[in-house]
Amino acid sequence: MTGYTGTPPRPLDLMDLPGVGRFLRWPHARTVLQIPLLMIAALMVFDGLLGPQLAPKNLATVLTWVHYRGLVVLALLLVGNLFCMACPFMLLRNLSRRFHTPARMWPHRLRGKWLAAVLFALMLFAYELFDLWAEPRLTAWLIIAYFSVALLVDSVFRGAAFCKYLCPLGQFNFVSSLISPFEVRTSDSEPCVQCSTKDCIRGRADSAVGQTRRGCELWLYQPRKQGNMDCTFCLDCAHACPYDNVGVSMRLPGEELWVDPWRSGIGRFSRRPDLAALVVLFTFGALLNAFAMVTPVYALEDWLAGLLGTQSELPVLALMFLMGLVVVPAVLLGLTGWLSQQARGGDRHNLGAEITRYAFALVPVGFGVWLAHYTFHFLTGFWTFVPVVQSFVADILGLPLLGTPRWELGPLVPAGWLFPLELGFLGLGWFGSLLVAYRLAALDAPRHPWRAFIPWAGLLSLLFVAAIWLMGQPMEMRGTFLVG
């Protein structure tokens, strides 16, 4: 009996699904997704500026800090970067470009993730410093600022400079989507070999509809694209491809974390310390963001205030974030990288290169923490949008059509389900990180992978235990009337 030698089955492609595929191939699909989100954003800004300034009664705070964050992580877990696909910020940008075409390129020295990483850390810091979950007006101004900066940057620079180099929300989605189950990629390599026009990145004129199909504005050339980093799922490449050869295909989640090919628009992960730094901020930021909502944080803040001799929150939070996002990660990663080098008996990488290479193993456990944290708030406060919408329609619009606001609404699932669900998300993240770390160690030390793997497994397990402890603490139910 001979083994199976046939062609392996083609992975599931959303473009092949009835209805879904036809919609995704439609050139206006993204616009149709963006319009409702733009309308919701406008209502949030309106209510945030003019509505009640009690957070649980305002659309700006409830929809932003409870529902948006929960939906984003669930979409990333189940499909991929759907928020960037439907991003309303880009709708206004696209409309403006009908009247003005930017000519400048983003400065070469800023073509990395260092600035984006700093902005990501500053957003986490501002969330705590200004209590954004409790401030509808500040949340509304944050939304306005996001639209304004995106419009300004992309009115000056070509491509999608704001998405690729600045947007903190986009960076969160890019890192998270590294373990998403779907990827925008070519279906067959042969048409790309024959293609001489490279329409997927250059764009093309479509005489059938009298429009220009733009190519990828994030400079990801499809035949050399690998994985989801920097991909907004905009599908411009799919619409521009004259061979209908770009799809949204299922893949093994996280597989791109342990392979290191040259990636179009990105290069090699192992040579991108800026990307590694973003991953580290993503992971330790997840722990710090959760820690800021549990009871022990108050004791730490009181101790730091006494140590600094101040009653101001700014220096206390600044020190806490400096320790949580810079000092502690540097010490833990430095020690782990050194132990890994010593365990395999050689300096195949210098310490910086070692940390850069293995930092990507943090992505699954980091995403597991964000997922457990955000779904806790999302599931606990799921129905809170109902009374807020009822109140908005009645009190702000003067149309009591939806009845008396039902402020007692809240959880989607029983409270007893939440902690086991959180443990499941954390466990999946931890297991995924262990798998990535082992695969990397097997490439570095094929004869004795366990020697290189054990130190990193120890660090990942430490983060896992810390996350379990955090999720087991009483947590503030910010922005709602609920009690954690």
Image: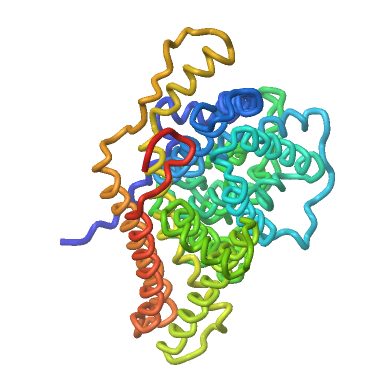
Q: Quadrant of residue 262?
A: bottom right
Q: Quadrant of residue 442?
A: bottom left
**Residue 363 x %, y %:** 46, 60
Q: Nearer the viewer, residue 65 or 349?
A: 65
Decide: is 398 above or below 430: above
Scheme by which the image is coloured: rainbow
**Residue 351 x %, y %:** 55, 82
> Most extreme residue toward the left, as rendered?
1
Decide: is 274 above or below 378: below
**Residue 134 x %, y %:** 55, 38
Q: Residue at x 44, y 54 (%)?
A: 367
Residue 436 in view (yes/no): yes
In the rendered picture of this protein, how many numbered marks are placed on residues? 0
Q: Nearer the viewer, residue 124 or 433?
A: 124
Q: Nearer the viewer, residue 47 or 270?
A: 47
326 left or right, relative to 249: right
Q: Residue at x 82, y 40 (%)?
A: 102
Q: Residue at x 42, y 46 (%)?
A: 476
35 left or right, relative to 284: right
Quadrant, the N terminus: bottom left
Q: Nearer the viewer, residue 435 or 27?
A: 435
